[in-house]
Amino acid sequence: MSFLLRRGATPQLALDALDQAITRMQNAVGSYPSSPAVEYVQGVQDVEVFLGNAFSRSWVAETFLTPLYWHLMEVAYLTLPDLPLPEGVPSHMVPYAPNETRTDQRRTVARIGPANLAADRERLHQIERLEQIRKDVQELETFASMGGKLLIIDTNTLMHAYPLEKIQWQKRNGMAADEILRVLVPLAVIDELDRKKFEGGDSMRRKAAAAIRSLYGHRKGLSPDVPSSFITTDNTTLALEIPRDDLGRTRSAATDDEIRDFGMFVKQVTGRQVTVVTRDMGLQVRCERAGLETLWLEDKDMRQDQPGGKSVAS
């Protein structure tokens, strides 16, 4: 996972925190009377505060409070016994005091010289990591900034409803005729469809395979991150998307929980309401309790209703 946002944090808040963190690490070079090792340790402490405003504090600690960080903290502040001058340590990496004797200087080099080298390498590595995280957050911000009404489709709908382009969306969703409908298909749903191709009876396997073929037909030749737009029978514009599930959050093991959690995350980063399309009562209850809207398609939109319901079409 690239990063983990705090609950309620937006991509913009995360970008602001990253800008502060990158600037702080760029400035943590160290000079007399400080040193690169000391400056790095202090810089990481500031970065922890900056990032903690937008990112999970446990993720920040796991990412930046590494074993090397704790080692540098110990080395930077403890005086070791008098040791021979290490070879290959540049003198400019060691802050000498004006009144230090040669023995004192040897002790200083032995104490923090190698630590300074390690700290400088680690500082550059962490800057590179922060810049990569910034690119990932920018990708999430792009996803969140796209317009359109947000719908999440569950496995049940894809298997038992008519194809997305044949559903009368305007009548079911109360949307404006000129409004784009962003249909988000979580990867957990794709995974479940893949499993159902090999599980259950022949009817279940056929429906799962047909759902996958229908999705693939709208995405053939497109990048996985590019929405596939098409017009439905009632002239609604659908933008079909299979978003990344590794940006800013952890994935839940159970599919229903993952659909609900993904919907809550989309609502968080976009600041807009999200509607989950489902004929699964358990998922509907989970989503509504989490503050998400739900859309229960009518029988006329279904090839076959849920177990216990009537067959609408073959």
Image (cartoon, rainbow, N blue to C red):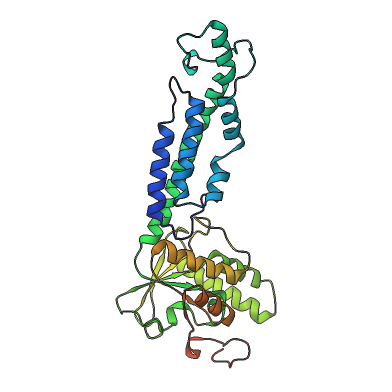
Q: Percent position (x, y) of residue 4? A: 51, 53
Task: Tell me if I can see residue 128 in this picture.
Answer: no
Residue extending farthest bottom: 310
Residue 148 at x, y = what percent?
A: 35, 69
Report the number of numbered marks: 0
The residue that appears at 47% across and 13% down in the rendered structure is 97
- Tell me if I can see residue 231 in this picture: yes
* Residue 106 in the image: above or below residue 227: above
Residue, far left: 178
* Image quarter of residue 254: bottom right
In-image side of 141 versus 114 (left or right): left
Write the residue at 48% across / 51% down. Answer: 55
In the rendered image, residue 196, in percent from the top left (x then y), is placed at 65, 73
- 112 or 103: nearer the eye? 103
Quarter of the picture holding the C terminus? bottom right
Q: Is residue 50 left or right of residue 87?
A: left
- Spot occupied by residue 188 in the image (x, y as percentages of width and height): 57, 66
